[in-house]
Amino acid sequence: MLPLSLLNAAQNKPMLVELKNGETFNGHLVNCDNFMNITLREVYQTNSEGDRFWKLKECYIRGSTIKYLRVPDTLLDAVKEEQNRARDAGRGARGAFVSGGNRGGRGAPSRARGGRGGPMRGGRGRGRG
Amino acid sequence: MSSLQGYVDRRVILVLQDGVVIVGVMAGFDQKSNVVLSDSKERIYSMDAGVEEVPLGLYLVKGDMIVLIGELDEAVDQAVDLSTIHAEPIPRIQY
């Protein structure tokens, strides 16, 4: 599972973000991008000593300054389930296409599908069960 | 190519640049070595008390921060009584 899939699934969920300088931000994730830049709303900020607090309506955090994010445990199962659903849906659609389009074409190099052409990557195995 | 794929779904130990040690099950990773850890715990070492384990849950650690990732031998790890271990904490990296 990709870290960014987890982050995307965390939208509107509470999270704790610690920056490299030790400051922490507690809030709900509003949005994020592929750099892990994020916006949070209803934020409690603490300094690195943990002895001063600020409340912010909303804040933007540059991804490169982040040390780690802590997200709800339940997200892991939610993301895995979503990925399984997506995979099954994809497999169903592709399987139908392959059995129709590949008939009699055994000997041809199977480059057309799978895009990358890497060994054992979607080129075989899927359609055969 | 070096890859973290072999660590997926295994219990691993992470050492970060600030000296923090985290153990958890690697749920995923990406090209930048960002790592998702489930059921993770921080291990806090000190000389005058045993190792303290602080539960952290589901964690996403940025690849920038990671110094080391190693697979834990769970059998050996569970055989160790952490409360008897006294050790210097790892100092943070200084440039």
Image (spheres, coloured by chain):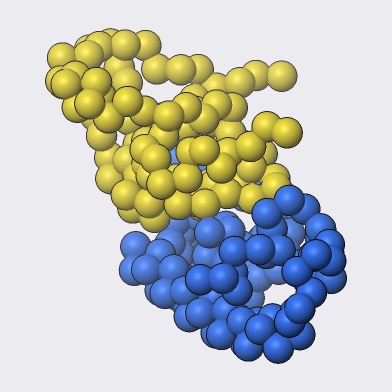
Chain colours: A blue, B yellow
User: Which residue is drawn at the image coordinates 52% and 65% (left, top)?
Assistant: A6
Q: Is residue B62 left or right of residue B90?
A: right
Note whether B80 is above or below A17 in the view shown.
above
Q: Is residue A111 left or right of residue B27?
A: right
Q: Quadrant of residue A5?
A: bottom right
Q: Position of residue A127 (x, y in %)?
A: 60, 74
Residue sitting nearer the eye, A81 or B51: A81
Residue sitting nearer the eye, B61 or A82: A82
Note whether B24 is above or below B70 in the view shown.
below
Quadrant that contains the N terminus of chain B: top right
Residue sitting nearer the eye, B49 or A72: A72
Residue sitting nearer the eye, B66 or B93: B66
Q: Quadrant of residue A115?
A: bottom right
Quadrant that contains the C terminus of chain B: top right
User: Which residue is drawn at the image coordinates 19% and 19% (left, top)?
Assistant: B80
Q: Position of residue B28 (x, y in %)?
A: 52, 52
Query: Is residue A1 at all visible to an observer of this figure?
Result: yes
User: Which residue is drawn at the image coordinates 47% and 74% (left, top)?
Assistant: A84
Note whether B12 is above or below A51 in the view shown.
above
Q: Quadrant of residue A57?
A: bottom right
Query: Is residue A40 at all visible to an observer of this figure?
Result: no
User: Which residue is drawn at the image coordinates 27% and 30% (left, top)?
Assistant: B74
